[in-house]
Image (cartoon, rainbow, N blue to C red):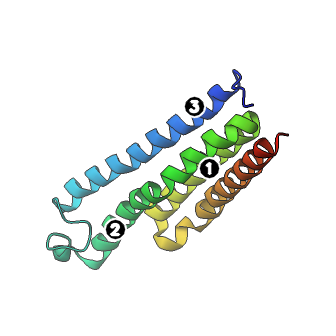
Amino acid sequence: MITVGNEYAWNLLAATVMGLQCFAAGMSVVGARKKYKVDYPDMGSGRYSAKLSDKEWVEFNSIMRVHQNYIEQLPLAILSVLVNGLFNPIQSAIAGDVYIVGRFIYSHGYKAYGPKGRMAGAMISMLAIVFNVGSSFFGIYNTLRGN
């Protein structure tokens, strides 16, 4: 039987901050669209972005990739922090916080230094996801076994 204690609120907080952080990354794209005059529906390789200099194109697409990559990871990051939180609320919340810090480092590094600048943050956030996913499966397995 799974019982949710008060500590689970930390998992809910981590999941909420992840969502807000992704939203903030999206707002960075809005700012970049205005700055570089890249209108919708251009996603960084259309007619509007073709008018950018090489430097501007890389800067715009780096900001775009930060947001797109977050969208790609967000479902698994949130799901794993919530599922693992049912079994290990404190450890899962800490891993969620590590993920959030990793995403901040990823975002700053990518925007400042391009694709190579994302690696430290990518590794940190990926380790947090792997921990929460692995622990989720372990908790589910033990629950199904009756432990």
**Residue 3: x, y in percent?**
72, 26
Q: Which residue is at 63% across, 60% downward?
A: 126
Left or right: 115, with 90 as reference point: left
Tell me the residue that label 3 is attached to: 13
**Residue 115: x, y in percent?**
48, 72
CB under 8 Å between discs 2 and 1? no
What kind of residue is marked 1? Tyr
Upstream in the sequence, badge 1 or badge 3?
3
When the figure is inspected, residue 106 is found, relative to residue 55, above or below; the finding is: above
Q: Residues within 10 Å of mark 2 (few under 14, many from 20)?
A: many
**Rounded to the nearest whole Å, what is the CA distance between mark 2 and mark 1?**
23 Å
Instruction: Say how many tags the image has.
Output: 3
**Residue 97 seen in this snapshot:** no
Q: Which residue is at 77% across, 51% downward?
A: 138
Residue 144 sits in quarter = top right
Tell me the residue that label 2 is attached to: 61
Front label number (2 vs 1): 1
The C terminus sits in image quarter: top right
**Residue 79: x, y in percent?**
56, 46
- State the mark number for residue 77: none
Q: Name the secondary structure under disc 3.
A: helix
Left or right: 125, with 109 as reference point: right
**Residue 55: x, y in percent?**
31, 74
Q: In this orientation, which residue lies closer to the viewer: 32 or 72?
A: 72
Q: Which residue is at 69% across, 35% downward?
A: 86
Q: Name the secondary structure under disc 2.
A: helix
When the figure is inspected, residue 29 is found, relative to residue 94, above or below; the finding is: below
Q: Which residue is at 20% across, 71% downward?
A: 49
Upstream in the sequence, badge 3 or badge 2?
3
Tell me the residue that label 1 is attached to: 99
Q: In this orientation, which residue lies closer to the viewer: 138 or 54?
A: 138
